[in-house]
Amino acid sequence: MEPMDDAVRLAQRLRSLRTQRWPHVKVTQPMLGVALGGLSNALISSWESDTHPKVPPISRLEAYATLFCTERSAEGGKLRLLQEDELEREEHAERERLRGELLRLRALALGLGQEEELPAQGFWHFPDGKPIRIICAQLPPDMLARMPYVDPDEPDYVELYTYADVDALLELHGHIRAVNPASEVRVRKAGPGRLTADDYTAHVVLIGGVDWNPVTRSVMEHLELPIQQRNEWGGEKGPCFEVGERRFYPELHDGELVADVALFYRGVSPLNRKRTLTICNGMYGRGTYGAVRALTHARFRDRNTEYLRARFAGNESFALLTKVPVFQRTVITPDWTDQEQRLHEWP
């Protein structure tokens, strides 16, 4: 099908949402424009045109999905865009279904294949537009001593070589920038004197665990999480995550990692209640990478996002302990709709 035909399909779907979604509720273009933030009738009309339709940006389609996922948006005869924390579990699921449908239509209207669809906003979108800090650990001194290009006095110094979890960092930084184009996104290295009050009170994303990342270690002490990381590298079974009397260990065969264990946490920041704290932390680096990829990988991010929103709807903070398969030394993105890959959930 030609892109123009696909653009018309998107326009018709948007018009049908407005005119047919709730047969006993009349939603006019002016009402819709006000609910979406004061948009003009002409702009709404251009999105619904059968002849020369304009393709809305992703953020507007996200708003459509939120608006039309529940008839509560039209309570009292006025159209209102509900906040995400106002939605019930079933409404979250319907929102995700609508969002996926509209973004697929948008991708086709722009001549993109569905596998090439631009990233939806999802869990890595911070709608308030406030600064975001991705905080990584530095490699420990004994490892840096074996690395080239890590001495700042050398002409070939490369600062990125000093970071731990570089694959997770690169994956996440690119994705967060893509879905938060207007936000200030900066990468910081954990350690004394490297971070300011402005860094700590932004939306904070921590990469890596309590062994190398001192910020993760300090933050975990403030959280009321029943999940603890045990760095028993010299123990009989090695390091693990502990929940009560249960322990979850990575799987190694003849010294080769075949499955890691990782923590994904999202909640209100203990350092600024108006911002969020997110932790992606594996026992090994590939677990950390898998925790990141669960919500960035084009083939898995939508289903994993939908699962999280349905499962933890109404919770300010939540955590998921996940298995991260490693096949032929390649990290396989965890699928959180698969019960076997969800090891523990809180609350």
Image (spheres, grey):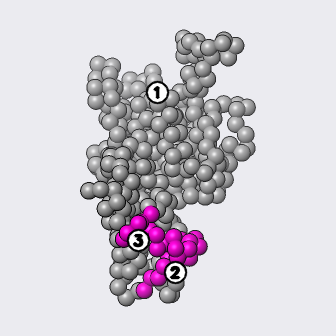
Q: Nearer the viewer, residue 313 or 302?
A: 302
* Numbered tag placed on residue 31 in the rendering: 2
Left or right position of 74 against 326? right
Q: Residue at x 52, y 76 (%)?
A: 41
> Residue beneath label 1, please?
232
Residues drawn in magenta: 26-54
**In the image, what residue occupies the spot 29% across and 56% down?**
2
Please tell me the numbered disc located at residue 49: 3
Sequence-first tag of 2 and 1: 2
Within the magenta stretch, is there residue 37? yes
Cα distance between the residues tagged 1 and 3 = 63 Å
Please tell me in which quadrant of the rendered image residue 219 appears: top right
Q: Amino acid at mark 2?
A: Met
Do residues under tags 2 and 3 come within 8 Å of each other at their CB atoms?
A: no
Query: Would you identify the image quadrant in which residue 145 lies?
Result: top right
How packed mark 2 is, by other alpha carbons closer than 10 Å (few <14, some 14-19, many 20 or more), is: some
Q: Position of residue 56 (x, y in %)?
A: 46, 62
Q: Amino acid at mark 3?
A: Ser
Disc 3 packing (10 Å; few <14; some 14–19; many ≥20): some
Answer whether residue 153 is visible to the viewer in this image.
yes
